Amino acid sequence: MLKHSSSSYEIQYEKTAEKFFRKHEDIRRQYIQEIAEFLVGDHPERVDVKILSGKRNKYYRMRIGDWRIVFSIINGKIIVINTVLAGSRGDIYKKIGGMK
């Protein structure tokens, strides 16, 4: 897992998400900006994030254009964002079916 750290949160990437972001660095940069706004920004309501229903663990979906990024938030001394999946809308919702 790779990490992106800030004073109040850390972003970790699962293998599938990291593979996507290696091909789409522009989406990674936008994702990092959107996470910052969502967690510590002045207008978190501007970020297109929804809680996914029907899963045991709480997963969130962030929309960036035609792309979807699935992540979970783990609380501790710092907030850890575990980025699980990233890809096109159709691919992501097919892959979510196999998540626990």
Image (spheres, rainbow, N blue to C red):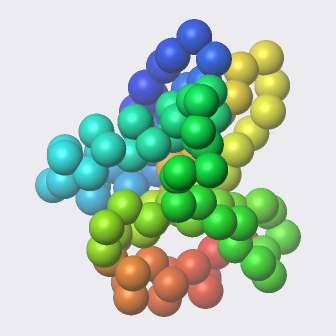
Can you give x and y, in whole percent of width and height, for residue 18 in the image?
33, 49
Give the total number of marks visible in the rendering: 0
- Is residue 4 positioned above or below 50 on the image? above
Q: Quadrant of the C terminus?
A: bottom right
Can you give x and y, in whole percent of width and height, for residue 74 in the image?
74, 39
- The residue that appears at 37% across and 61% down in the rendered structure is 64
Q: Is residue 33 visible?
A: yes
- The residue that appears at 19% across and 53% down in the rendered structure is 24
- The residue that appears at 40% across and 37% down in the rendered structure is 32
Instruction: Name the side, left or right, on which 44 lies relative to 84.
Output: right
- Is residue 41 positioned above or below 64 on the image? above
Q: Is residue 86 visible?
A: no
- The residue that appears at 77% across and 61% down in the rendered structure is 58
- Is residue 85 positioned above or below 34 on the image? below
Instruction: Name the side, left or right, on which 3 lies relative to 78.
Output: left
Q: Quadrant of the N terminus?
A: top left
Query: Going by the picture, which residue comes out furthest to the top?
Result: 7
Can you give x and y, in whole percent of width and height, for residue 21 in the image?
27, 51
- Is residue 67 positioned above or below 27 on the image? below
| Image quadrant assignment for residue 44 | top right
Can you give x and y, in whole percent of width and height, for residue 67 in the image?
34, 69
